[in-house]
Amino acid sequence: MSEQETEQLRRDIERTRAELGATVEALSHKTDVKAQAREKAEQAKTQAREKAELAKTQAREKAELAKSQAQEKPAIPLAAGIGVAIVALLLIRRRRRS
């Protein structure tokens, strides 16, 4: 066997060892049930945090929109308040009559 063939064989052996090491590591990870469960739990926590933050942001935006609309048209909330007060007064009067 020539020096060049020997060197090529050594490179092939090193490459095969590296590939085998990566394969063993991947198999080891697949069989580690606890680690997989921790990863999934962490993913679920992250998703829950993201969804909560999104809901919080959306609620804040809707509240700000409602506030700005109420400031632009104060007659609408005022009229609604007066309507509720009238209904409440009528219900109180009915109860007193009964």
Image (cartoon, rainbow, N blue to C red):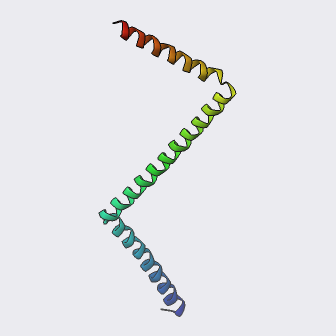
The furthest residue to the right: 72
Where on the picture, by quarter, is residue 93? Answer: top left
Q: Position of residue 44 (x, y in %)?
A: 40, 52
Q: Is residue 53 left or right of residue 40?
A: right
The furthest residue to the top: 97
Front residue of 49 and 41:
49
Q: Position of residue 89 (x, y in %)?
A: 46, 14
Q: Quadrant of the C terminus?
A: top left
**Residue at left 46%, top 16%?**
88
Q: Is residue 50 placed above or below 71 in the rendered structure?
A: below
Q: How many marks?
A: 0
Where on the picture, by quarter, is residue 66? Answer: top right
Q: Is residue 31 left or right of residue 77?
A: left
**Residue at left 55%, top 21%?**
81
Front residue of 79 and 50:
79
Front residue of 44 and 49:
49
**Residue at left 41%, top 13%?**
92
Q: Is residue 63 placed above or below 98 in the rendered structure?
A: below
